[in-house]
Image (cartoon, grey):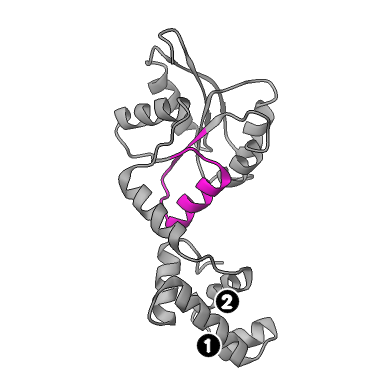
Amino acid sequence: MTDTAIIRIMIVDDHPVVRAGLAGMLSTQPDMKVIASASSGSEAIAMLETVKPDVILMDLRMSGMSGLDAIRAINLRTDPPRILVLTSFDTDEDIYQTVGAGAQGYILKDVPQDRLLEAIHLVYEKKRYFPADIAARLIERMARSNLTPREHQVLQYVAKGLTNKEIGRVFGISENTARNHVNSIIEKLEVSDRTEAATIAIRQGLVSITD
């Protein structure tokens, strides 16, 4: 980055107060300029037809198109802007999915201002920014074998407390086949039993008991 370079920033967050607060803070930085703000992923994508940010600050949980879906769509574009996830959520699965979608950084909204500014600069310079604790969890999550789509489905019902027989009824499979799925899940998650599998899956964001 040269002395005269200005980092053009887009803020994507569905809370107007958050957008305004970020814009106000970033406007005090001589080398940064907020050129656009959007309240949803779809609005951000539409804006990219007319504005060219260098860095997008992307929230994850938004009404309409989520931040994750927006990241995937933006990275299909030619020469996409760099994306720094700025969120209140830090489940292992959130972190893993956003990196897989193409985000270059991940930071929580409660970080000190200087950390956020550092993250923006690094992402702009085509580097990555992941705080040490988040990076460690990402490595652990990536090292774990991925569950198959059916195992993800079965895990949802394990987390809700269904027995193998009840899970079998849900999917129209035998109790023995359901048991095999559950055993495979336990092995891949490296846990001792189905209760621990459910607990870890809920804590890490693999499933939600409200699904």
Q: Nearer the viewer, residue 125 or 40?
A: 125
x 37%, y 55%: residue? 137
Q: CA distance from mark 1 to mark 2?
A: 11 Å
Q: Secondary structure at mark 2?
A: helix
**In x, y percent, where is residue 129?**
40, 37
| Residue 154, disc | 2
Amino acid at dot 1? Thr
x 53%, y 38%: residue? 14
Image quadrant where one finds the N terminus = top left
| Residue 21 visible in the picture | no
Q: Nearer the viewer, mark 1 or mark 2?
A: 2
Image quadrant where one finds the C terminus = bottom right
| Residue 163, disc | 1
**In x, y percent, where is residue 56?**
52, 30
Residue 189 position by quadrant = bottom left
Amino acid at dot 2? Val
Left/right of residue 8 with respect to residue 168 in the rendered view? left
Residue 194 position by quadrant = bottom left
Numbered label tally: 2
Q: Which residues are magenta?
A: 83-105
